[in-house]
Amino acid sequence: MKLADTAAIVTGAASGLGEATARYFAEQGAQVTILDRDAARGAQVAQEIGGHFAQTDVTSEEAVAAAIAHAADKMGRITACVNCAGIAIGAKTVGKDGPHPLDAYRRTIDINLVGTFNVARLAAVEIAKNTPDADNARGVIINTASIAAFDGQKGQAAYAASKGGVAGMCLPMARDLASSGIRVMTIAPGIFMTPMLAGLPEEVQQQLAADVPNPARLGDPREYGRLAGFIVEMGYLNGEVIRIDGALRMR
């Protein structure tokens, strides 16, 4: 499947990794529909790339179903789903103010893990409607984990658990959807220059970059987008988690 022939939905594409992916896909000739809670920014990015937008809460079955129907109507079909929507919090299991807030833990799991599964399962129904090619391929789902799934640091219990779940469901989901001709891949990014990190002091950014073995810098969100594009086009990639982190192992 070529990017130029792809009709993709990208969640969390109003900023960060999702925005970079949406922009890269559009540059390569793909049709793109952005799914994001941020209506103003999401609509702006969609307009800039010549795509479409649907305001979406990924945790809502009704909202996601409506967004996917909107995307399919505007693009004629959906052949790729890239899940980038997510949040990150920092809290120790027991901190200075007591135990980890349970509501914050639940919200992280709900958005990062349940939200990813919610979009993936509903997108799969739509992708399965496509006519298969010679390899019986109908499309691909790309989810976003994190190296925190494997190397979670202090204060990352909620985030690491949510991303560990995303990584863990990659293979069984790929096996579930194999008969429908839908591949499932997961990308586990390291430390990328997202809006959250861009707001940190310069010295903090430099220290984070220095921890990366090679190249000793923060990841460029566009590199994530290019990897997602490679996965779309490389049809024999399936059921695997790919780290993109400059060989960083957090401790």
Image (cartoon, grey):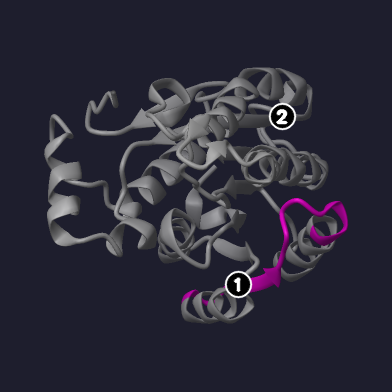
Residue 8 position within the rendered picture, expressed as x and y whole percent measured from the top left:
61, 55
Residue 205 position within the rendered picture, expressed as x and y whole percent measured from the top left:
19, 52
**Between tags 2 and 1, which lies in front?**
1
Category of crowding for the residue at label 1, using alpha-carbon neighbours closer than 10 angstroms: few (below 14), some (14–19), many (at least 20): some
Quarter of the image that includes the C terminus: top left
Q: Can residue 145 be seen in the rendering of this structure?
A: no
- In the rendered image, which quarter is residue 51 located in? bottom right
Q: Name the residue that disc number 1 marks.
A: 38
Amino acid tagged 2: Gly
Residue at screen point 76% across, 43% down: 118
Residue at screen point 63% across, 45% down: 104
Residue 185 in the magenta stretch? The answer is no
Residue 113 position within the rendered picture, expressed as x and y whole percent measured from the top left:
66, 37
Q: Where 238 sits versus 20, above or below? A: above
Q: Where 245 sits versus 48, above or below? A: above
Category of crowding for the residue at label 2, using alpha-carbon neighbours closer than 10 angstroms: few (below 14), some (14–19), many (at least 20): many
Q: Residue furthest right?
A: 62
Horizontal side of 16 relative to 141 (left or right) equals left
Using the image as rendered, state which of residue 37 and residue 104 is in the foreground.
104
Q: Name the residue that disc number 2 marks.
A: 181
Q: Can residue 109 be seen in the rendering of this structure?
A: yes
Sequence order check, earlier mark of 2 and 1? 1
Residue at screen point 31% across, 56% down: 197
Q: Where 201 sits versus 144, above or below? A: below
- In the rendered image, which quarter is residue 106 located in? top right
Using the image as rendered, state which of residue 76 and residue 149 is in the foreground.
149
Quarter of the image that includes the N terminus: top right
Which residues fall within the magenta stretch?
A: 49-63
